[in-house]
């Protein structure tokens, strides 16, 4: 009898869990902090960007999944085969740099979360966290434990409650969607680029393609994948919306250079009160555990594909030495970078600004592959999805050019 009632739950988990995990991983420590900074520094004025970006990121993520379903090849392999080794090398470099920036930021974020839980300096937690996460990826089964880490992301639902309890001006929020108040200055442009950078995470695109291959999906799963991806990223961006709303109402400091982790934690104060810092600390640790293995693995997939090494999280380290070597090397580079006394909020925020600048290159090649009849055959993506991708490239490129204009 119990089996009868559990069957729909098992079906839902099998069908939608991968998309929800990928979407939840997009709300990693650097993303949560970035959305909080956006709310604290710009109020509701950038919520319209979040609304616009939701269908765009779903379209690109869906194209990434469809490429894996149809071709059974990773993105770097396809770029190398169809556009040349040199361009593939450039893409790998952009991806690894973007991932490394986010990886450093997320490890700092997890360490800052443990600082909130223990009142000890975050510096003490960096090396143990690197060792622990490295061990999980290399010697454990990430796909198996991701099911457990996924529940940590449920803590992010607390932002929905906090956002409502903060009693925001819902009329002002509605007006911010209908008549956006864009301010053409460096603070606004930087916040917008950071928010879009963390929403359009390159590692999520690469991971989605590789996940379809590892799960042995094919063209029969395309519609199922679309539903899974859509649900996952709608969930992710709904959380982002309430993070911004909660932060805009509760965090009074509007200068990113002076914001602390404790300041950002106050976005949860309407729900958790004095426990806000502890709840935020648990959320940072849990979201980092979900996201960091995906970050590190997507870089390893890209490098291994470029050099035709054995790859896959389903392989033992002895059978994919290069693949796991890249993961290990990434963590060692993080360790070197983290020796310096990095300001947690600044490193998490500014890393996403740089990711926003690097992302258009990755999206460009996803669009070229997804639209190619030679590569995708009758399954090439339709014009609506491709239009979404080009809009994303244009918006990110304009943001990067505007930022360069203000800096120069």
Image (spheres, grey):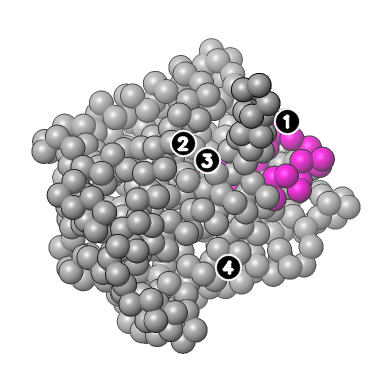
Residue 378 as seen in the image, left or right of residue 397: right
Q: Which residue is denoted by mark 1 in the rendering?
A: 216
For the N terminus, which image quadrant? top right
- Residue 360 falls in image quadrant: bottom right
Residue 259 locus on image (x, y percent): 18, 60
Residue 220 in the magenta stretch? The answer is yes
Q: Which residue is denoted by mark 2 in the rendering?
A: 150
Query: In the structure shown, which secondary structural element does the residue marked by tag 3 occupy?
Result: helix
Residue 37 locus on image (x, y percent): 29, 63
Q: Nearer the viewer, residue 253 or 255?
A: 253
| Residue beneath the point at 69% across and 59% down | 367
Q: Which residue is denoted by mark 4 in the rendering?
A: 392
- Marks 4 and 2 close (CB-CB < 8 Å): no
Separation of residues labelled 4 and 3 (CA atoms):
23 Å
- Marks 4 and 3 close (CB-CB < 8 Å): no
* On screen, residue 258 above or below 338: below
- Marks 2 and 3 close (CB-CB < 8 Å): yes
Mark 1 or mark 3: name the one nearer the start of the chain.
3
Picture disc at residue 21: 3
In magenta, the rendered stretch is: 203-226
Separation of residues labelled 2 and 3 (CA atoms):
6 Å
């Amino acid at each position: 009898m119990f089996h009868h009632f559990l069957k729909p739950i098992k079906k839902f988990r099998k069908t939608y869990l991968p998309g929800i995990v990928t979407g939840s991983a997009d709300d990693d420590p650097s993303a949560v902090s970035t959305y909080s900074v956006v709310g604290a520094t710009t109020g509701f004025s950038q919520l319209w960007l979040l609304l616009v970006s939701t269908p765009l990121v779903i379209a690109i993520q869906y194209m990434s999944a469809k490429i894996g379903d149809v071709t059974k090849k990773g993105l770097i392999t396809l770029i190398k085969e169809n556009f040349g080794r040199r361009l593939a090398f450039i893409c790998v470099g952009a991806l690894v740099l973007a991932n490394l920036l986010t990886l450093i930021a997320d490890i700092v974020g997890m360490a800052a979360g443990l600082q909130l839980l223990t009142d000890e300096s975050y510096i003490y937690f960096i090396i143990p966290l690197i060792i622990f996460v490295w061990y999980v990826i290399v010697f454990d089964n990430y796909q198996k434990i991701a099911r457990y880490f996924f529940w940590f992301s449920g803590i992010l639902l607390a932002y929905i409650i906090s956002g409502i309890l903060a009693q925001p001006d819902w009329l002002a929020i509605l007006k911010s969607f209908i008549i956006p108040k864009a301010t053409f200055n460096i603070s606004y442009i930087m916040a917008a680029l950071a928010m879009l950078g963390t929403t359009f995470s390159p590692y999520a695109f690469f991971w989605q393609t590789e996940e379809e291959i590892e799960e042995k999906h094919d063209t029969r799963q395309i519609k199922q994948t679309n539903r899974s991806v859509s649900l996952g990223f709608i969930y992710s961006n709904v959380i982002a919306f309430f993070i911004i709303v909660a932060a805009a109402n509760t965090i009074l400091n509007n200068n990113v250079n002076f914001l602390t982790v404790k300041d950002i934690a106050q976005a949860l104060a309407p729900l958790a009160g004095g426990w806000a810092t502890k709840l935020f600390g648990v959320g940072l640790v849990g979201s980092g555990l979900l996201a960091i293995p995906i970050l590190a693995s997507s870089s390893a997939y890209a490098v291994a594909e470029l050099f035709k090494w054995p790859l896959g999280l389903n392989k033992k380290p002895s059978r994919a030495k290069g693949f796991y070597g890249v993961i290990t090397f990434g963590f060692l580079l993080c360790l070197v970078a983290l020796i310096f006394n990095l300001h947690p909020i600044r490193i998490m925020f500014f890393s996403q600004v740089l990711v926003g600048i690097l992302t258009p290159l990755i999206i460009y090649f996803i669009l070229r592959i997804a639209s190619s009849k030679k590569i995708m055959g009758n399954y090439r993506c339709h014009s609506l999805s491709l239009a979404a991708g080009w809009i994303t490239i244009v918006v990110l490129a304009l943001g990067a050019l505007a930022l360069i204009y203000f800096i120069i």
